[in-house]
Structures are given as C-alpha cells and as structure tokens.
Amino acid sequence: MIYPIRLYGDPVLRKRARPVQDFGGLKKLAEDMLETMFAARGVGLAAPQIGLSERLFVAVEYADEPEGEERPLRDLVRRIYVVANPVITHREGQVEGLEGCLSLPGLYAEEVPRAERIRVVYQDEEGQERTLELEGYMARVFQHEVDHLEGILFFERLPKAKREAFLQEHRAELARMQKEARALLKELSQR
Ligand SMILES: [Zn+2]
C-alpha cells in the first residue's frame, strides 16, 4: 500500500513521535513505508511522514546513484534498514552536505551540517536490539530521519542566516505546500 506523504505544514511533522511498543504489525507497515518511499524515489521515510507519530523509519542504501535511473529503485538496493526507537549514542566529526526531503518536494539545502560518523542503537522490525556504526551519506540519512521523530526538518539544522535565506528563497513553494498539506488533511478526514 502506498500512503500519501504528508507535506510541510502538516502538524504531524512537528510532533515528537511516541515509542514503538507493539511490533506485531511492524513488518507490514515497514513494507508499506518502503513501497511509499520507492514510489517517491527517496532514500528514507519516517513514520510521521505518513501521518503516524511513531518512532520508526525506513532507509535504503543503494548500490548506485538512483538519480536519472530508468530501472526500478528496488533493483539498486544494497541494504534496507527498518529502524524503530533509534537513539544516536555517539557522534563524531562534522560535515556539510546536500539534503532534501519527501515532505518538502523539490526543495534542497546545501551545507546542512551533520555528524560525520554516528553510532545508533535501535530495534529492528522484530523488536531485536541492534547497533550500527555509520559514516558519510548513510550517517546523514539516519540523522535526517531521527530528526523527523523529534519534529525537526532538515533546513532547521542550517545556521540561522542560511535558514532564513532558505525560508525567504522558497517562501512561495512553502506556502503552496502548506496549502496542499491542509487540503490533504481535509481529504483524509473525509474518507
Ligand atoms: Zn525528510
């Protein structure tokens, strides 16, 4: 099942998500989130982005750059992560890099600061505790997704002047997204 992706302006993106406690339906939910993420050609998707305020996200490491590829994204998958209740227990180094978000389609910011290396403790789709050490791009993806569980969007990690420039530059698109977010909420409430 492909979920509609919640857009900038939807209050669910601003909430601190609650811990996952019931792992019963998690496999199916994670599969649906992956399907939604692949359809939108993303690298990660957090539960709040489908309107579910739980501490869960999916992320994918691709073998090649999916950019401009004609092949289905699933063919390029190297590794899939289903991550519940993540805690970043160690951060090291700092790097700046490009980020976008499926909840702010078409908008990107360069120079988003993130830790270069992280250690993250989480539970997999069966509730098993796991520890991962990540660096570079996947470390960035995980930090972006963990932020979603705290109600934080990527541009808010920019230093103040750049954050204000981002909001100013994309004012019209952001206003349009807020309008779309409200229309989607209205539609969903009438289903
Ligand atoms: Zn995002």
Image (cartoon, rainbow, N blue to C red):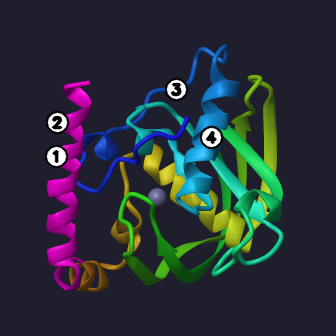
Q: Alpha-carbon distance for marks 4 and 3?
A: 9 Å
Q: Are circles 2 and 1 on residues that touch, CB within 8 Å?
A: yes
Q: Alpha-carbon distance for marks 3 and 2?
A: 27 Å
Q: Is residue 58 left or right of residue 63?
A: left
* Mark 4 Cβ and ligand 1 under 8 Å apart: no
Q: Alpha-carbon distance for marks 4 and 2?
A: 31 Å
Q: Is residue 186 magenta?
A: yes
Per the image, the residue denoted by label 1 is 182
Label count reads 4
Question: Residue 173: image x %, image y %?
Answer: 21, 73
The numbered mark at residue 86 is 4
Residue range corresponding to the magenta coloring: 167-191
Question: Residue 133: image x %, image y %?
Answer: 80, 57
Q: Is residue 89 magenta?
A: no
Per the image, the residue denoted by label 2 is 186
Amino acid on which disc 3 is placed:
Pro
Amino acid on which disc 1 is placed:
Arg
Amino acid on which disc 4 is placed:
Pro
Up the image or down, 70 lies above or below 161; here it is: above
The numbered mark at residue 19 is 3
